[in-house]
Image (cartoon, coloured by chain):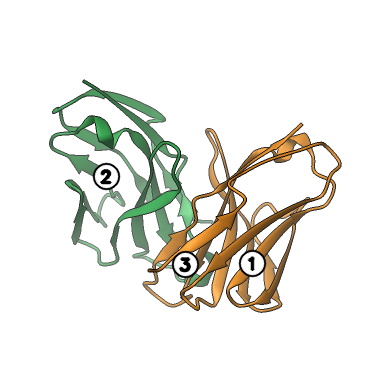
Chain colours: A orange, B green
Amino acid sequence: DMKVTQMPRYLIKRMGENVLLECGQDMSHETMYWYRQDPGLGLQLIYISYDVDSNSEGDIPKGYRVSRKKREHFSLILDSAKTNQTSVYFCASSSGTPNSDYTFGSGTRLLVI
Amino acid sequence: GDSVTQTEGQVTVSESKSLIINCTYSATSIAYPNLFWYVRYPGEGLQLLLKVITAGQKGSSRGFEATYNKETTSFHLQKASVQESDSAVYYCALSDLNYAQGLTFGLGTRVSVFP
């Protein structure tokens, strides 16, 4: 079963704490993504990973970093979380080829207080 | 850059009535991008509803249809008779020539179906 799995589903952190969001996929896809989704703003691209240790900034990378040490895992890290990073975060993967599908995880709802 | 426009942020419709969600697009690197509709049901993640990669073609899934209209650069989503279970947020999206760059999404349309 082709799947993107995100952990945790829900997370509450205090301002200034570090946050680690994890994403895994079982499709051996080369390309993975992190998006955030806010009401009225749609989904915004934070980072792209083309493969292990090959990452690129998306449209809103400020305040985030990523790590991809294995093809199947892609982590999003918030060093010193801010309240404006409260959001729903979606991970996705694709084969990175023309006409590819993009498979999304169930999302992580992060609340920074 | 690329853009996807969904004009309605929220739509309310009675069960068994028809639904149309408008979507227009603009792609800078390619004349005919791949077009997608995703859906997010309450409490769930983002699911692919349908995808069309050829201009002029129609995609369909779960009773929904969308036709890729290159003349009007539109990809409206329609359903003839909605059910309460269709209540969700619907996102139109495109991928262009830089397909590895991911999807460009519209802002989403929240559909509420009441009995």
Q: Nearer the viewer, residue B34 or A46?
A: A46
The mark closer to the camera, 1 or 3, is 1
Say what secondary structure mark 2 lies in: loop
Q: Which amino acid type is shown beneath numbered disc 2?
A: His
Say what secondary structure mark 3 lies in: loop
Which residue position is annotated with label 3?
Answer: B29
Which residue position is annotated with label 1?
Answer: A74
Q: Which residue does the image show at 39% across and 71% down from the upper left?
A: A100
Q: Which residue does the image show at 83% across and 52% down from the upper left?
A: A79
Q: Position of residue A86 (x, y in %)?
A: 68, 37
Chain ID, mark 2: B
Mark 1 vs 2: CB contact within 8 A: no
Q: Nearer the viewer, residue A31 or B85?
A: B85
Closer to the chain start, of discs 3 and 2, is 3
The mark closer to the camera, 3 or 2, is 2
Q: Relative to residue B113, is residue B45 drawn left or right?
A: right
Q: Position of residue B24 (x, y in %)?
A: 35, 46
In the rendered image, the vertical position of residue A35 relative to residue A113, given as above or below: below
Task: Mark yes or no: residue B72 visible.
Answer: yes
Say what secondary structure mark 1 lies in: strand
Q: Which amino acid type is shown beneath numbered disc 3?
A: Ser
Marks 1 and 3 sit apart, C-alpha to C-alpha, by 28 Å
Q: Position of residue A59 (x, y in %)?
A: 64, 55
Marks 3 and 2 sit apart, C-alpha to C-alpha, by 22 Å
| Quadrant including the C terminus of chain B | top left
